[in-house]
Image (cartoon, helix red, strand yellow):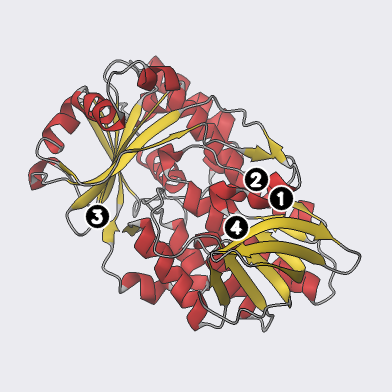
């Protein structure tokens, strides 16, 4: 635990010390405003979502944390690779339409999240680990949160404003009945870390590898290399496909990997040293991203799908958008949370959603594996894959559905 246990009131209270909580609290603290973070877990702790996008670097840089991240020795990442049977396609994020960072990192989230949290502490943020938020009450002048510590102590803290950065914990949506069904189909994922022992000529460690199942085109795998010789691996499928596969989670994951020819080679000598985890129905939505004296960040608000690694990018974008609005509100200025936060954040989320839907219906796969690709269009697509889903100068952001549909028709017409 960091900070005093005698906390009674703070200007801003953040629930969760993950990436969005660390970035948001730091940006707020930099403006001289008191901020306290309550985090249920103790860091470092395991989390998936390990392949960052270059757009993330902008938000990390804004918070003054980029040097610390670079010094950690994480795996360099310059793009994404896609594989379907004998088809192989790559995108270099440095060859993109949008300005900004063109490279990033693949990160074990336990270490990465801890680095950001430690940087937040270094800049004066008060983080309390082992503090679980259990209740929330609203009063005319403040919000009161109930929490419980690891040793069972129960207490309360008041704040002028609350940011929920609890990720999949979705604390405020659960407490205030804000959860809303996702419009995306229910899918399951099996995942773990392995020592991959992969031959260097079969595995580009500078890219995330997305593999499509040879028979089920809506089933896909991620392979994310780390700098220590390990990799994060996982498969995403409809629940029935995983349920009907015999064995425990490890046996199921191994069977699905065996079904993908390229992964059979890449992971032929992989050593499984962790339990295989499972998530089902992870896509989520909410009725509103904000309310009276609170706002939701990242996965606490909406989570789409892991296929394009957009989760951390959306989380950090939400932190970057919300922090200055919180500062203005604390200082007595008028804030239009619908226009300045919700509408703006959802513009990028909707862009990602268009590409996620196009991935699962096969349209986007037709595009990325097409043998003839125009360089300017590739650069625009590369920008989306690099996380620049809020760049309205990109036609595939400004008119994502229409442009993507037109491109699909063009690609299919050339077959």
Q: Sort mark 4 into few (<14), some (14-19) or many (20+) by Cα contacts within 10 Å.
A: many
Residue 46, image x, y percentages: 38, 54
Q: Which residue is mark 3?
A: 226
Image quarter of residue 367: top left
Q: Do labels 4 and 2 touch, CB within 8 Å?
A: no
Q: Give percent across and percent down for residue 128.
A: 56, 72
* Badge 2: residue crowd in 10 Å (few <14, some 14–19, many ≥20): some
Q: Secondary structure at mark 2?
A: helix
Which is in the foreground here, disc 3 or disc 4?
4
Circle nearer the N terminus (3, 1): 3
| Local SS, label 4 | loop
Q: For mark 3, does the 10 Å Cα neighbourhood hold few (<14), some (14 to 19), or many (20 or more) residues?
A: many
Q: Are marks 1 and 2 in contact (CB under 8 Å)?
A: yes
Q: Which mark is residue 346?
A: 2
Q: Secondary structure at mark 3?
A: loop
The image position of residue 332, as x and y in percent, is 85, 75
Residue 331 is left or right of residue 263, and the answer is right
What mark, if any, has residue 165 been given in the picture? Answer: 4
Inter-mark Cα distance, 3 to 2: 31 Å
């Amino acid at each position: 635990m960091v900070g005093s246990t005698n906390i009674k009131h703070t200007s801003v209270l953040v629930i969760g010390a993950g990436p969005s909580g660390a970035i948001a609290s730091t940006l707020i603290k930099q403006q001289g405003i008191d901020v306290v973070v309550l985090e249920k877990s103790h860091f470092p702790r395991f989390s998936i979502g390990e392949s960052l996008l270059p757009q993330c670097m902008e938000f990390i840089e804004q918070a003054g944390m980029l040097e610390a991240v670079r010094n950690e020795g994480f795996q360099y990442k310059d793009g994404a690779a896609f594989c379907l049977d004998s088809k192989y396609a790559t995108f270099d994020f440095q060859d993109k339409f949008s300005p900004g960072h063109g490279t990033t990192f693949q990160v074990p989230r336990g270490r990465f999240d801890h680095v950001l949290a430690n940087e937040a502490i270094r800049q004066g943020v008060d983080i309390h680990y082992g503090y679980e938020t259990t209740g929330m009450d609203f009063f005319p002048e403040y919000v009161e949160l109930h929490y419980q510590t690891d040793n069972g102590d129960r207490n309360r803290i008041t704040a002028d404003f609350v940011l929920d950065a609890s990720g999949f914990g979705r604390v405020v949506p659960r407490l205030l009945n804000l959860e809303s069904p996702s419009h995306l189909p229910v899918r399951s994922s099996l995942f773990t870390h392995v020592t991959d022992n992969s031959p260097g000529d079969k595995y580009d460690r500078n890219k995330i590898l997305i593999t499509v199942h040879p028979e089920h085109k809506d089933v896909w795998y991620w392979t994310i290399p780390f700098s220590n010789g390990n990799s994060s691996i996982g498969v995403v499928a409809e629940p029935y496909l995983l349920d009907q596969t015999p064995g425990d989670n490890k046996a199921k994951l191994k069977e699905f990997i065996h079904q993908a020819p390229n992964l059979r080679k890449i992971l032929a000598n992989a050593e499984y040293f962790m339990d295989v985890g499972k998530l089902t129905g992870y896509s989520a939505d909410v009725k509103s991203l904000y309310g009276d004296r609170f706002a939701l960040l990242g996965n606490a608000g909406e989570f789409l799908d892991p296929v394009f690694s957009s989760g951390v990018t959306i989380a950090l974008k939400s932190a970057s958008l919300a922090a200055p609005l919180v500062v203005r509100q604390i200082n007595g200025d008028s804030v239009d949370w619908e226009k300045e936060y919700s509408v703006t954040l959802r513009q990028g989320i909707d862009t990602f959603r268009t590409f996620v839907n196009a991935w699962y219906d096969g349209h986007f796969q037709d595009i990325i594996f097409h043998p003839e690709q125009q360089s300017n269009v590739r650069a625009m697509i590369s920008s989306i894959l690099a996380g620049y889903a809020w760049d309205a100068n990109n036609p595939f952001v400004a008119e994502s559905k229409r442009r993507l549909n037109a491109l699909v028709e063009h690609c299919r017409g050339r077959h």
